[in-house]
Image (cartoon, rainbow, N blue to C red):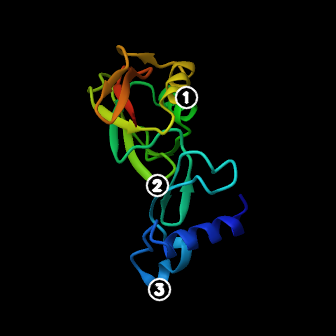
Amino acid sequence: MGDRRLRTVLREAVRQGHLSPGKDPAKDAGPEGATGTMATDSLPAPWSRGRLVVRRGRVSKAHARTDYLELSVRDAARSKEFYAAAFGWTFQDYGPGYIGFNDGTGESGGMRVEAEPAPPLAVLYAEDLDAVKARVVAAGGTLAGPEIEFPGGRRFHFRDPSGNELAVWTRA
């Protein structure tokens, strides 16, 4: 979808109340300040499947999203390679010991480079759980047990190349 069409869609989504306008009306007027998540059923491909995550007018169709997460990793380069391949994340290096990551909605966490990683458990959300599971395995992750079904959804746990265990869930 072109920028002009996307701006029109975001403006209409704000008008209909699907997205919130920005907090500063002077700076965030129109779609540039839009924030929220919206269904994409009425949009043309490639935006028509799932939901769009909109933060400060920027749109993401990342494979999975986080709210905020901090991981410790042994190998910064390998970890960045894994998360880029599995989830489409991008990175900002803040020196040799810390890397910020962006899941498409803004900086949502970071990775500390340490000899012995600490074991967090973060839960990510994805619209297409099976596709994300396949990407995790293809990128070098290992599944950590069977898929779990629960009221309202299902999830799987995996380990990244540094040994961090995470989970990804989706709605039923």
The reply to whether residue 79 is in sight is: yes
Query: Disc 2 or disc 1, which is closer to the eye?
Result: 1
Q: Give percent across and percent down for residue 29.
A: 51, 80
Mark 1 and mark 3 residues within 8 Å of each other at the beta carbon: no
Q: In this view, does 79 lie to the left or right of 47?
A: left
Within-10-Å neighbours for mark 2: few <14, some 14–19, many 20+: some
Q: In which quarter of the image is residue 148?
A: top left
Q: Which residue is drawn at 57% across and 73% down?
A: 11
Q: Which residue is drawn at 56% across and 47% down?
A: 61
Badge 2 is on which residue?
Answer: 106
Q: Distance between the residues labelled 2 and 3?
A: 21 Å
Q: Is residue 157 above or below residue 66?
A: above
Badge 1 is on which residue?
Answer: 131
Q: At label 1, which amino acid type do we have?
A: Ala
Q: At label 3, which amino acid type do we have?
A: Ala
Within-10-Å neighbours for mark 1: few <14, some 14–19, many 20+: few
Q: Is mark 2 on a helix, strand or loop?
A: loop
Q: Which one is earlier in the sequence, the residue at label 2 or at label 3?
A: 3
Q: Which residue is drawn at 30% across and 25% down?
A: 117
- Quadrant the C terminus occupies: top left
Q: What element carries label 3?
A: helix
Q: Which one is earlier in the sequence, the residue at label 2 or at label 1?
A: 2
Q: Which one is earlier in the sequence, the residue at label 1 or at label 3?
A: 3
Q: Is residue 104 above or below residue 144?
A: below
Badge 3 is on which residue?
Answer: 26
Q: Give percent across and percent down for residue 104.
A: 52, 50
Within-10-Å neighbours for mark 3: few <14, some 14–19, many 20+: few
Q: Give percent across and percent down for residue 156.
A: 38, 24
Q: Is residue 20 above or below residue 39?
A: below
Q: Residue at x 29, y 22 (%)?
A: 116
Residue 59 vs residue 165, the one in the foreground: 59
